[in-house]
Image (spheres, rainbow, N blue to C red):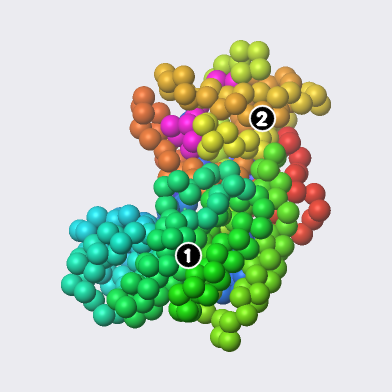
Amino acid sequence: MGKFKTVNELVNSLKPDYPVYCIRLNEIKKSVKFFRENFPGKILYAVKTNPNEKIIKQIINNGINEFDVASLNEIKLIKKIKSDSKLHFMHTIKSKESISSAYFDYGVKSFSLDSKDELRKILDATNRAKDLELFVRIAISNEHAEIDLSRKFGALPSEALGLVRLCKDHSRKIGISFHVGSQCMHKISYSKGIREIGNIIKKTKIVPDTINVGGGFPSVYPDLNPEPLINYMDEIKKELKNLKLNKLPEIICEPGRSLVAESGSTIIKVILRKKNNLYINDGTYGSLFDAGAPNFVLPSKMITSGRAHSKKLTAFSFFGPTCDGLDYMKGPFLLPNNIKEGDYIELGQLGAYSLTFRTNFNGFYSNEIHELSDKPIISMYDNTNDKVGSLVA
Ligand SMILES: *Cc1c(COP(=O)(O)O)cnc(C)c1O
């Protein structure tokens, strides 16, 4: 891993013929600081979003010591980096073997579930341990999210009541959690989740030890410009107050995207131009999965290295390097009209759900990762009104 001041410096010195992934550690410092100052509780980082070791270490160095993990390998990874960190196995569907190993080999006590059968598995696999912290994940609408998780996870209100009662009998601490879906564009989804928890408290007369409002906090993209994150925090605080509980439970969240999206970008090279389609050297089987079927529009910036670029911006679509037609990214990606074969482009907001998605398909795989200290193309943590910077470098 090399260090460069700017994207230009990196491209001029490497002239890379392969995609290069950039990490801006300073952006993580900003996002973690924002959450620590404004979220009314504890912050867990959702490891799946970006398990790169540099990223995890930066998150730890800025004061986060608890993690949302979903597999044994994620558990091993975090324990290797920091053995005393607290892990929460928040995948609601786990194999018995992984539950057992998490508990007995790695000391994980905190598990999430959304069905009776999963509760039974957890109890069996831990030999009916007496020190469990069990989270019941309830289903809530993901209507304002770009990535919907609600069909796959979550107990319906009718099942949730029974589950909360059962967990109360079988655990040392009980939590209730929800996930509004990823890149949630409206704060109201959090209020709805908290209100739903309020209903469960009323009906069961059980006040959980922990309320977990999950992840889903948005980042910013050219066509997805959410209201300021501080409004989400205010909304959550207001709704928690509305629960009118004598003593508020511990509150936790598990952000992924909003903590790390701004910290990553990919530098790609144009292999061929066909009208408004650019064939590039990375794609949906590389770091650009989210630009494929989920159709995230990424901020794009031509790296001119002194070459004259036209002022006129044109909307381009991208094709990735593999032989698969699905390796297509619709965009629109706005770039100078005279872009051509051999030019470099930086694509931003790729710190989340990107590096970790790379495959070896068709032999295209790059593991070139470098650190940068310049600013990302767009940012929602910078204190300027203008979230979008210049589209050329
Ligand atoms: C993926 C995931 C998260 C993180 O979601 P973001 O939308 O990236 O914030 C948090 N909690 C759980 C249980 C998840 O599966």
Q: Regarding mark 1 in the picture, which secondary structure is present there? A: strand
Q: Horizontal and vertical percent for residue 36?
A: 60, 71
Give the x, y percent position of residue 9: 63, 41
Front in this rendered view, residue 17 or 352: 352
Q: Residue at x 48, y 25 (%)?
A: 327
Which residue matches tag 2? 333
Kindly indicate whether the residue at mark 1 contacts the one at mark 2 (C-beta within 8 angstroms).
Answer: no
Amino acid of disc 2: Phe
Q: CA distance from mark 2 to mark 1?
A: 37 Å
Q: Going 68% across and 35% down the picture, which residue do you hit?
A: 301
Q: Nearer the viewer, residue 77 or 172?
A: 172
Which residues lie in the magenta part? Answer: 278-289
Q: Which residue is mark 1?
A: 177
Using the rendered view, name the quadrant where residue 332 is placed.
top right
Q: Is residue 160 magenta?
A: no
Q: What secondary structure is marked by label 2? A: strand
| Residue that appears at 75% across and 49% down | 387
The residue positioned 52% from the left and 55% from the top of the image is 140
**Is the residue marked 1 within 8 Å of ligand 1, measured from its CB?**
yes
Observer able to see residue 16: no
Q: Nearer the viewer, mark 2 or mark 1?
A: 1
What secondary structure characterizes most of the magenta part?
A: loop
Residue 252: image tag: none
Side of 230 relative to 50 (left or right): right
Q: Give residue 73's position: percent from left, percent from top.
A: 30, 55
